[in-house]
Image (tube, rainbow, N blue to C red):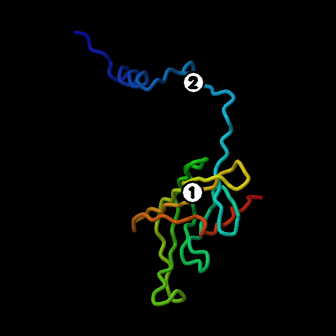
Amino acid sequence: MKTRNLAMVVPAAAALALGVTGVAGAAVIKNAPEVVPAVVLDAQGDTQIEPEAILLSPADGNDAVNFITWLVWNDGIAVGTGVEQVNTCEPTCAEGVTISKPVVIVLDNAEPLDDSDDVHFTEARISGVDGTRTVELSTVAILPVEDAA
């Protein structure tokens, strides 16, 4: 009875099952439409792609997602990780302490911008240790990305 070298057979079978056949199997898409990424549109009418921070309570600055690293950003969804920093406002907001916690932020529900082919996200879902909540992006402020000059 012959034995086969499983170290060679298993990876080869997996590659064939996944359709990996080397350079000959590479797909080339020609004349594909350009995908224009969606933007964040805040209450002041400012738009931005991949903001570093989103102020969830811009009136008082007591809740923000900062240090956002975007993992996915396209015309339908954006997914990132960041740090939500919330003022406890106890006993008052002036005397409260800021609590930082890691979160995942998902932007979606893209809708067309007025008189444009562009789209903007209208909702943010923020998930962390305290659960998940949805925020309407029309009520937030975005912080500009600093140009690396």
Q: Nearer the viewer, residue 109 or 58?
A: 109
Dot 2 alpha-carbon crowd within 10 angstroms: few under 14, some 14 to 19, many 20 or more = few
The C terminus lies in which quarter of the figure? bottom right
Q: Nearer the viewer, residue 72 or 5?
A: 72
Which type of secondary structure does the marked residue at label 2 adopt?
loop
Whether 146 is drawn above or below 29: the answer is: below
Dot 1 alpha-carbon crowd within 10 angstroms: few under 14, some 14 to 19, many 20 or more = some
Question: What is the x, y in percent for residue 8?
Answer: 38, 21
Which type of secondary structure does the marked residue at label 1 adopt?
strand
Query: Is residue 51 left or right of 90 when viewed as pictured?
Result: right
Whether 118 is drawn above or below 52: the answer is: above
Which numbered marker is on residue 26? Answer: 2
Which residue is tagged 1? Answer: 69
Question: What is the x, y in percent for residue 66?
Answer: 57, 66
Q: Residue visible at 54% across and 74% down?
A: 63
Whether 22 is drawn above or below 110: the answer is: above
Q: Which of 27 and 113 is in front in this view?
A: 113
Q: Disc 1 marks which amino acid? A: Thr
